[in-house]
Amino acid sequence: MNKHELKKILEEQKASFKAAPPDYKKRMESLKSLADAVEKYKDNLVSAVSADFGLRAEEETLVLEIFPLHDQIRHAMSNLKTWMRRQKVSSSWFLLPSSAYYQFQPLGSVGIMGAWNYQVLLTLSPLVDAIAAGNHAVLKPSEIAPRSAEVIREMINETFPIEYIHCVTGNAGLAQDFSSMPWDHLFFTGSTNIGKKVMAAAASNLTPVTLELGGKSPAIIHEKYDIKKAVSRIMAGKLLNSGQTCVATDYVIMPASLNSEFEKAAREKVGSAYPDLSENNQYSCIINQGHYDRLHSLLEDARQKGARIVELSEEEVSSHKKMSPKLLFDVSDEMKIMQEEIFGPLLPVVNRPDVEQAIGYVNEHPKPLALYYFDSNRKRIDHLLKHTLSGGVCINDTIFHLAQHNLPFGGVGNSGMGHYHGFDGFQTFSKKRAVMHQRSLAASDMLHPPFTGFKQKLIHFMGKLSRV
């Protein structure tokens, strides 16, 4: 696939869209077709994902990708008629007797760039929203996970005609060409650094973008919260896909008095969840040698700069296939592991004596994609929500706020821009179009020039009525 071929596909899609934008019936049929295709290719998708990683549990892919995707389609189909309905709003008093409403209209042909860590979900979930909104689409799965990318390509291109929905695969060069196409909207999931390049490429066409990025998502634990419960939920979310999750806890903030309890509980959690780690077929591998080397480099840099590294497994697994879970104490901001998103099974602990100082630490750094807080005190919870800003928040758990269809998912600042999931995804891929309908007799006719006599008095009177 080269740039010329990609441009030809986009032109064909735009022409098809102009001829007949998808109506409610076609959108519903397409969502059902996508659901049927995912079910038909389910085993192939699961196998391909595991092959890309070297090992990922079937159950993990089913729970984290296939099931959420089916449920998202179900949710969209259940609500689509309501989402598409025009919404009346009250008219401004000086424009009476006009009526006003808005309606959502599809944008056209959109580009969707997926991510390797959850290739199936992060490529097809935005497609669900794009279909629901009535768009045509071209998908570009990540080349870092090539086997799952090829299965998605085969599945999509067998199910839909090229002028409606199509999938292309290729290397990083194709990704660059893809982001420079004049899409009606471009959706990208990936790292902050690549997100900047995608946005720069899209800017030449004034293409609006949604960037789902990442960053360092912290978990704050109050000293009075049940430490074992907090550790169980933090480690469960952290070790899904061996930490290769954009909203995995990147570091923990808590009082130093909790360190020993945290370490003990974390070791127990790892032992019970992943016994016999080297042979455990439910503990995911690291995606490739390059990513493993990066994690190892972060670990060694922290070790050399004074971090205390705690092995959480009875056996230390160290290979390009797996990396055993580790805690890091006595970390500092000079360490690379506290500067980059980790994306692996390494969990630093930052000690701060109270929540106020924990909030201060979070606010001194780029705004995270997710913020986790463990506390049972409503007043303190509200205080944290008021004095921090992040893409999303989960209280007393991690990761699962993503599964709330009626909540938007998206970052802020370095962690991304724009939202998707549910109605917010439908809105992202739509134009919220304003419509005003004026009557044959309208007060606004009195606002035309020339402004003399009665009109001048009327304008001054209106000004007085409009003041607060």
Image (tube, helix red, strand yellow):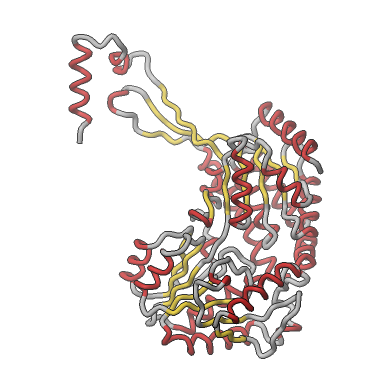
Q: How many marks?
A: 0
The reply to whether residue 128 is visible in this rendering is no
Q: Quadrant of residue 293?
A: bottom right
Q: Quadrant of the C terminus?
A: top left
Q: Quadrant of residue 461?
A: top left
Q: Camera-side residue: 404 or 320?
A: 320
- Identified at 58% across, 73% down, the residue is 238
Q: Camera-side residue: 172 or 258?
A: 172
Q: Quadrant of residue 130?
A: top right
- Identified at 48% across, 88% down, the residue is 261
The reply to whether residue 146 is visible in this rendering is yes
Q: Quadrant of the N terminus?
A: top right
Q: Camera-side residue: 437 or 169?
A: 169
Q: Position of residue 355 (x, y in %)?
A: 37, 74
Residue 453 in the image: above or below residue 226: above
Q: Is residue 144 left or right of residue 183?
A: right
Q: Position of residue 333 (x, y in %)?
A: 50, 72
Q: Position of residue 279 (x, y in %)?
A: 76, 83
Q: Position of residue 424 (x, y in %)?
A: 51, 48
